[in-house]
Image: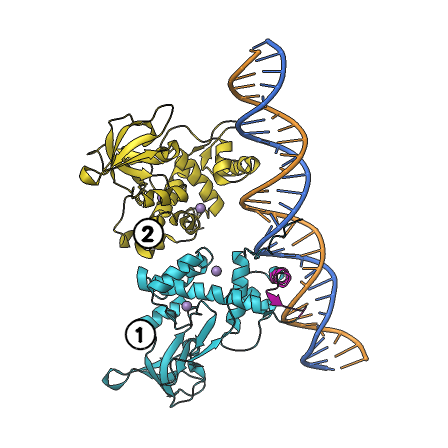
Chain colours: A cyan, B yellow, C blue, D orange
Amino acid sequence: MVTVKPAAVKPTPTSSSVEDYVKVIYAFTEWQDKPITSTQLATRLGVANSSVSEMVRKLKDQGLVDHQPYSAVRLTAEGQSLALSMVRRHRLLETYLVQELGYSWDEVHDEAELLEHAVSDTFIERMDAKLGRPSRDPHGDPIPAADGSVTMPAAHRMSQLDPGHSGRITRISDHDPELLRYLDQQRIGLDAPIRVQGRKPFGGALVVRVGTGPAARDFDLTEEVSEALWVSPEGTHPGCTLTRTTLT
Amino acid sequence: MVTVKPAAVKPTPTSSSVEDYVKVIYAFTEWQDKPITSTQLATRLGVANSSVSEMVRKLKDQGLVDHQPYSAVRLTAEGQSLALSMVRRHRLLETYLVQELGYSWDEVHDEAELLEHAVSDTFIERMDAKLGRPSRDPHGDPIPAADGSVTMPAAHRMSQLDPGHSGRITRISDHDPELLRYLDQQRIGLDAPIRVQGRKPFGGALVVRVGTGPAARDFDLTEEVSEALWVSPEGTHPGCTLTRTTLT
DNA sequence: AGTAGAAGTTAGGCATACCGAAACCATACT
DNA sequence: AGTATGGTTTCGGTATGCCTAACTTCTACT
Ligand SMILES: [Mn+2]
Ligand SMILES: [Mn+2]
Ligand SMILES: [Mn+2]
Ligand SMILES: [Mn+2]
């Protein structure tokens, strides 16, 4: 009689490239619904189109994405789960670097981009505990919980807000460190109360008031800046929790 | 007239494999003088002999090692410098994990082995500052300073000590986590006062007394254990600083 | 000195992850 | 309906870093 081993638990050692691909695919649909195309993926990853075609085939073979030739790339449940765990890693690391090692919010992204692939689950858990299980990173991006649930703030791009609207800045795109330093300098930070005053004519700057009462200051924001800021109407703040998937 | 660019400062992006090879070559001569051979390198890195031959050629091309066929491998000044900076990274990380994230000393090695290749110089500097510029890691191994200087404790392998000798444990080999847990359990730690009482006959255990006065306890140590412990005679402790090389 | 076996190197391959150039397809515009 | 165009894939190739198997060199023992 032969003893049958229990099916191996698939250690699937995903490479850091795979992790980055999946993370970028996820990020593309975090604040809107259209799935990402090959070329967009290539641009965001800084690789050639042909490299993406190849890798997407591998991701499909591994069951991480759905894809048919010439159409967009979508994560499977398994891919979504891997992506969420990478996003969690990335954002916890960013938060840790700011909170514990005195990084400024424009320095953390690149460091986290590498560390996310190197730290162990234990490391993540210890950081999370030490930070008190934070739900947002230094840029206001939601940190998925260990079980895969994500609390998305009910936020709108400031560039799309009509005059009169007000609320708080609950997210700031972290992609341009330059921009983050500019905002820092102007003392425009996360959770600042903000109000859209109006727009200069002929597609001009958006005029906003930051702060309230005597401390209020007015700014002319370019399109680029107002597209990087997300505003939640006062009161709605904590956002809604939606479980996107379940992490393994 | 043509402006000549200053010679590029050689960004030499060393791979993590190269970093590990160089680190292992360095470690081999840290506590004795014989240079490492191909086979020893292969064993320590867990790769095939042929892989080492190939890689050593590349290291030589990059000016990191001296080597002629069929003989041992030695670091050049440049290789030494790279090795020291990797050792510094590794040991600072181990110290940080224990001190700041509650790791136990048997858990840190593997985590540091990966992180050492991923963290930035900034990260290292912040950690170093936060820890108060430590000079020893959790296992008593000296942490090279940023300038490449190393303070080596004047220590001897306990297995080679004659009865009657005493001192303090200033280094414990961190290669076997099992052993570290055993020592932890027996409450034998770094800086514990220790005295060699004698040796059981026929190549038997080494009998040592740990602690002093009423708290003293006697142990029978196997060869394996006594080879992992290094003892400094009382008083000599701080060790001698020798600048091994200068880091870039 | 002669030689067997250990130590080390070379040769031929594989996997991953890139690239540029060429071929292909879908569609949108005449 | 016919075709230009841009997005996408395929093809051939490069660089790392690893492997096994075959071969070479060194050394230590007879
Ligand atoms: Mn990354
Ligand atoms: Mn962020
Ligand atoms: Mn390593
Ligand atoms: Mn150590």
Which residue: 40% across, 81% down? A231
Q: Nearer the viewer, residue D2 or B86?
A: B86
Q: Name the residue under label 1.
A: A186
Q: Name the residue under label 2.
A: B98
Q: Which residue lies furthest to the front in this view?
A: A1
Residue B148 position, x and y percent, is 32, 41
Residue B128 position, x and y percent, is 30, 51
Residue A27 in the figure: left or right of residue B152: right
Which residue: 35% across, 30% down? B205
Query: Of circles 2 and 1, which is in front?
Result: 2
Is residue A67 inside the magenta stretch? yes
Residue B192 in the figure: left or right of residue A137: left
Residue D25 position, x and y percent, is 57, 23
Query: Looking at numbered disc 1 in the image, what kind of residue is underneath it?
Result: Gln
Which residue: 19% across, 39% down? B214
Crowd around label 1: few <14 · some 14–19 · many ≥20 (10 Å)? few
Is disc 1 placed on a helix, strand or loop? loop
**Ligand 2 in which quarter:** bottom left
Q: What stretch is highlighted in magenta?
A: A52-70
Disc 1 is attached to a residue of which chain?
Answer: A
**Which quadrant of the structure image shows residue A154?**
bottom left
**For disc 2, does the CB lie below 8 Å from ligand 4?**
no
Above or below — where is D2 with respect to B134?
A: below
Q: Which residue lies furthest to the bottom in this view?
A: A164
Above or below — where is B131 with respect to B221?
A: below
